[in-house]
Image (cartoon, helix red, strand yellow):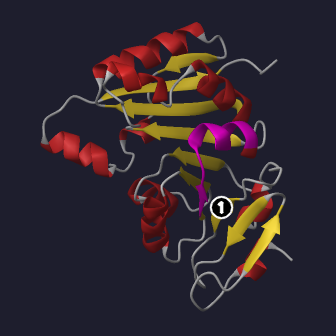
Amino acid sequence: MSFRTLRCSRCFPLARRILSGVEASARCRHFPYVIELVPEMQVARLDVAELFGRSAPLHVDLGCGDGSFLCEMARQFPKRNFLGIERLTKRVEKVRRKAGKIENVRVLRADTLFAVRYLLPKNSVETFYLLFPDPWPKRRHQFRRTFTRDFLEAIAAALEKHGILRVATDQVDYFHQIERLSRADLQFQAVAPSLEAAVLPVTKFERKFREQDAPIYRLTLRKTSPVR
């Protein structure tokens, strides 16, 4: 049974199947699957071609929120596959509603680092987006920030040769931390944003920050050397 045979014309969860330690759930006839982890099982890496029903460049939105950016990107670039990773169930539900009949969108309900490190195949991702991650501004909470050395190692393993990581934040201290960690990692090089990056869809958070005239800090990293 393929992923596509799980589509259902009635309410979720009428169809369900365990595939390689991942639980794929059909929310409705036209919505691409919300993938939920089964914690007690050993989880294998995703078969991306089977998940999307085709082979195409894979772009991954880390912490996809309500799915506005993810879905607009999928509409603009129908020849690419777009995977959103989101930990919070309510946000995943919002993505489900926004995605509608967009065929090149999938959503993975999981922790970001876990998903990148253990679920995405090595050398499989063309571009990652980490847009306005939770800054955890209080010093005692900063250990919870997504962007760490371990995160960069996992990103490097999942990116294909010369793959891209795009980062944006409104928090200057977090941005400085991101810059320091990036400069220390020889697997990445900071590059000038491409023309495509200049016209990316605006996320919900970016729209809010623009309305407040808050500065936005961006960094584009390219994978420059293979993972050893």
Label 1 element class: strand
**Residue at coordinates 75% horizontally, 67% vertically from top-left?**
53
Q: Is residue 111 magenta?
A: yes
In the shown orientation, is residue 34 left or right of residue 94?
Answer: right
Q: Which residue is drawn at 45% across and 19% down?
A: 178
- Residue, x 38% and y 32% (percent of image)? 168
Which residue is more in the foreground, 205 or 128? 205
The segment highlighted magenta reads 106-118
Q: Which residue lies furthest to the left in this view?
A: 212
Left or right, 208 with reference to 8: left
Residue shown at 55% from the left, 32% from the top? 165
Question: Where residue 213 sits in the image (x, y, percent)?
Answer: 13, 35
Which quadrant of the figure has residue 192?
top left
Residue 202 visible to an observer of this rendering: yes
In the image, 38 versus 119, the foreground residue is 38
The x, y position of residue 5, in whole percent, is 77, 81
In the rendered image, the quadrant that contains the N terminus is bottom right
Classify the position of the C terminus by image quarter. Answer: top right
Give the residue furthest to the top. 184
